[in-house]
Amino acid sequence: MEKDKLEQLLNDVAEGKVGTAEALQVLKTLPYDDIGIAKIDKHRELRTGHSEVIFCLNKTPKQVAQIVKKMTEYSKLIIGTKASPAHYEAAREVVPEAKYDEDAGMIIVGEMPEPKSDKVIAIVTAGTADIPVAREAALTAQSYGHKTKEYYDVGVAGIHRLFDKLDEIREANVIIAVAGMEGALASVLGGLVDVPVIAVPTSTGYGSSQGGMAALLAMLNSCALGVSVMNIDNGFGAGYFACKINR
């Protein structure tokens, strides 16, 4: 189904010509592109406002390149997360204008949009080791047209560093707290601000951190209100959710 047909369906629903149940059945059968190694959801942007994102981890560079090439046919902005330099080089062979952010491990094809509003997403890390996940969140939000401000290495081990930036952080519309080790940063921020806090545990830490499980469980058990929790190292999910809150 092409875009104009989908828009007609939505208009028919709005005008009462087509019932909700009937429309849902149509939407469930919208087409996708089957390229063998992947079934690309062509109309996700029409449904959700954002096109499908390529999760590069455990895909071969050749597979990522195939998906990127196909998506250029109908997506103005393509994002690949958890991408290695090898993934990027393969993507660049088929789309020379592809860009790569090494810190975030992200491939971006297309122009980043101008911010849609002045609402700011603050991205706060406990330590320098958490920056890759924070950068993934920041680039995700920027790719979808949102302003970000990043505050690095302000964890609870030197909590005066956080207090030094607290007035600025409080001006944000939503806060992403990225922390490994024991993950205390999200709870501390949750008790100091009046906006939503999205907590992202990272796999940073010594043995007992269990690859981020300690931070994840600490954040899930936060006694601070207004804190939601992403999965371990899921900077993309945090950036995406922050955009939904901003909208």
Image (cartoon, rainbow, N blue to C red):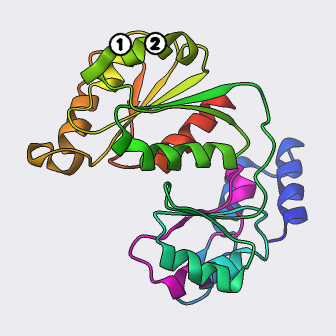
**226 vs 148: above or below:** above
Question: Can the viewer see residue 23?
Answer: no
- Packing grade of label 2 (10 A; few <14, some 14-19, many >=20) is few
Q: Residue at x 26, y 31 (%)?
A: 183
Q: Is 90 displayed left or right of 177 in the figure?
A: right
Indicate the amino acid at tag 1: His
Please tell me the numbered disc located at residue 208.
none
Q: Secondary structure at mark 2?
A: helix
Indicate the amino acid at tag 2: Asp
Q: Secondary structure at mark 1?
A: helix
The magenta region covers 41-65
Q: Is 106 displayed left or right of 125 in the figure?
A: right
Q: Residue 58: horizontal and vertical position, in percent?
A: 38, 75
Considering depth in this image, is 42 or 78 the residue closer to the camera? 78
Question: Which residue in the structure is indicated by mark 1?
Answer: 160
The quarter of the displayed image where residue 239 is located = top right
Q: Residue at x 72, y 49 (%)?
A: 49
Q: Is 103 displayed left or right of 6 in the figure?
A: left
**67 vs 245: above or below:** below
Considering depth in this image, is 5 or 221 the residue closer to the camera? 221
The quarter of the displayed image where residue 44 is located = bottom right
Question: Which residue in the structure is indicated by mark 2?
Answer: 164
